[in-house]
């Protein structure tokens, strides 16, 4: 790879990270798997009455700044061995705990957790009074067969049924980023007119859209669409604030445009797919010097919450410890100082040096028709890069350790039949990716990297 673009020399990489990062223990056992949780969660009691709330200027609703993203509900193997199912008992426990500690916004979609999220979320929430929570879901008519008016209305009605509600507090046009997509999914079929009538009838209390795409389209939606939008969901974190890549737009621009129009904002990807919760040694040391008791994730959540136009920051919390940690961060929120903002920009500059694949593990690309675990492949590659277990130079003194860590961890994280070498370059996955990653190209790049390791063993 060419230095400064797609990769960097390992020696320079480790020097950049700091001496403490040089070949971690994972070098001898393989990079950590997805199931490994970090040991840097904040400790102490979890407040029940100190959650920070923001007021929706249209409705007066007090919305918890921590919103529960229902994209990653916990799953378990089915008893008949035919795959996985949502662990409903654990979902109920998480929802009960969230509500008891002040979280009152739950965001889902017909597409989340292989189409099971809305039903599971509805089961958990229906056990509580309707006025104790706000429901957010989406018109996820991505597939051509769902884009007729009739099919899209069926999606809408099915969401009401699955969530066991007779109105939506927040409803979004799901993941739009170009006029062509907007025209096809919402205008030509008349579904936007239908949703506007539903808002008028009160069955949609707030109508908005989630954005991944072109700056020109974002401007069009605000200035020329002819619709008064009640809120917008954007990707915002301290890296994407000024350094968005691929199909994303710098969040400082998106925020400023919405702020000056007084439009409330929902935030997605506050941890940029988890990467900002698993920083390298050098970046963590920078943050620890500022606050030794805070972890990497809490810094990212504080950044998102420090902007006053943000109505809620959505987090997909699969595990109880993540939920507890985020509740601590926002109970109450301690806004960042300018000095702390500057430190996070320093960390972002460091991250810019890493040749990460910008995958947020949303799984929209799944299932792969050839069985590849696309998010798992990218996650392992990014994780080993973050840990310093990365080298392309066979003469590097740490090459053998990096090779062993990467290959051992790869086989543990991703079954052999689901690894990158099985990609056929069919391209079915790429159009589904909200980050617009050229997935086959990245898989082939990682496969070449793996093959070089095998050849030079």
Image (cartoon, rainbow, N blue to C red):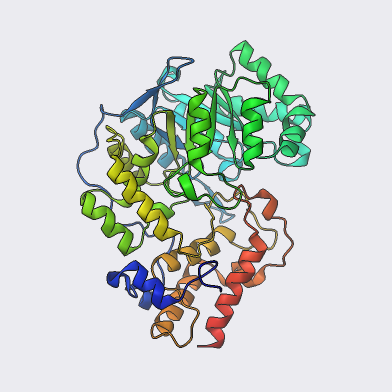
Q: Is residue 139 above or below residue 34?
A: above
Asked if one can make out residue 375 in the rendered structure from this viewpoint, the answer is yes
Nearer the observer, 365 or 3? 3
Q: Is residue 382 above or below residue 89?
A: below
Q: Is residue 142 above or below residue 133?
A: below
Q: Quadrant of residue 130?
A: top left
Q: Does 207 sit left or right of 312 as displayed?
A: right
Residue displayed at 63% across by 43% down: 213
Q: Quadrant of residue 46?
A: top left
Asked if one can make out residue 176 in the rendered structure from this viewpoint, the answer is no
Nearer the observer, 422 or 61? 61
Q: Is residue 284 above or below residue 225?
A: below
Rendering coords of residue 174 (x, y %): 62, 35
Nearer the observer, 323 or 386? 386
Residue displayed at 43% across by 55% down: 275
Residue displayed at 32% across by 28% down: 52
Rendering coords of residue 430 (x, y %): 68, 54
Q: Residue furthest top?
A: 201
Rendering coords of residue 141 (x, y %): 69, 36
């Amino acid at each position: 790879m060419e230095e400064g673009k797609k990769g960097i020399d390992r020696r320079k990489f480790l020097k950049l990270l700091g001496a403490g990062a040089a070949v971690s223990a994972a070098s001898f056992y393989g990079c950590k798997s997805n199931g490994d949780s970090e040991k840097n969660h904040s400790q102490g009691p979890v407040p029940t009455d100190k959650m920070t709330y923001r007021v929706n200027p249209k409705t007066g609703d007090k919305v918890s700044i921590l919103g529960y993203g229902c994209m990653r509900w916990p799953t378990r193997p089915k008893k008949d061995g035919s795959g996985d199912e949502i662990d409903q008992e654990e979902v109920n426990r998480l929802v009960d705990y969230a509500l008891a500690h002040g979280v009152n916004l739950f965001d889902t979609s017909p597409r989340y957790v292989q189409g099971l999220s809305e039903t599971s979320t509805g089961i958990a929430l229906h056990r509580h009074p309707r006025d104790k929570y706000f429901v957010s879901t989406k018109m996820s008519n991505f597939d051509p067969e769902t884009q007729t008016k009739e099919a899209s209305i069926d999606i809408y009605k099915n969401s009401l049924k699955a969530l066991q509600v007779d109105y939506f507090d927040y409803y979004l046009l799901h993941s739009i980023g170009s006029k062509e997509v907007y025209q096809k999914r919402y205008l030509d079929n008349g579904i936007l007119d239908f949703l506007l009538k539903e808002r008028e009838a009160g069955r949609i209390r707030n109508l908005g859209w989630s954005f991944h795409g072109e700056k020109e389209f974002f401007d069009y939606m605000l200035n020329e669409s002819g619709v008064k939008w009640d809120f917008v969901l954007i990707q915002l974190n301290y890296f994407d604030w000024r350094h968005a890549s691929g199909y994303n737009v710098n969040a400082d621009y998106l925020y400023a445009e919405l702020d000056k129009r007084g439009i409330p904002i929902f935030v997605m990807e506050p941890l940029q797919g988890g990467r900002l919760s698993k920083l390298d040694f050098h970046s963590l040391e920078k943050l620890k010097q500022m606050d030794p008791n805070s972890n990497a994730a809490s810094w990212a959540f504080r950044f998102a919450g420090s902007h006053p136009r943000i109505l809620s920051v959505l987090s997909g919390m699969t595990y109880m410890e993540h939920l507890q940690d985020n509740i601590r961060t926002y109970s109450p929120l301690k806004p960042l100082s300018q000095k702390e903002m500057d430190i996070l920009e320093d960390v972002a500059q460091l991250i810019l040096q890493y040749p990460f694949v910008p995958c947020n593990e949303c799984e929209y690309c799944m299932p792969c028709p050839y069985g590849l675990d696309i998010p798992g492949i990218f996650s392992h590659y990014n994780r080993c890069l973050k840990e310093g277990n990365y080298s392309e130079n066979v003469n590097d003194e740490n090459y053998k350790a990096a090779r062993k860590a990467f290959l051992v961890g790869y086989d543990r994280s991703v079954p052999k039949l689901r690894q990158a070498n099985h990609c056929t370059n069919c391209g079915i996955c790429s159009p589904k990716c909200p980050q617009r990653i050229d997935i086959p190209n990245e898989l082939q790049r990682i496969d070449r990297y793996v093959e070089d390791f095998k050849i030079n063993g």
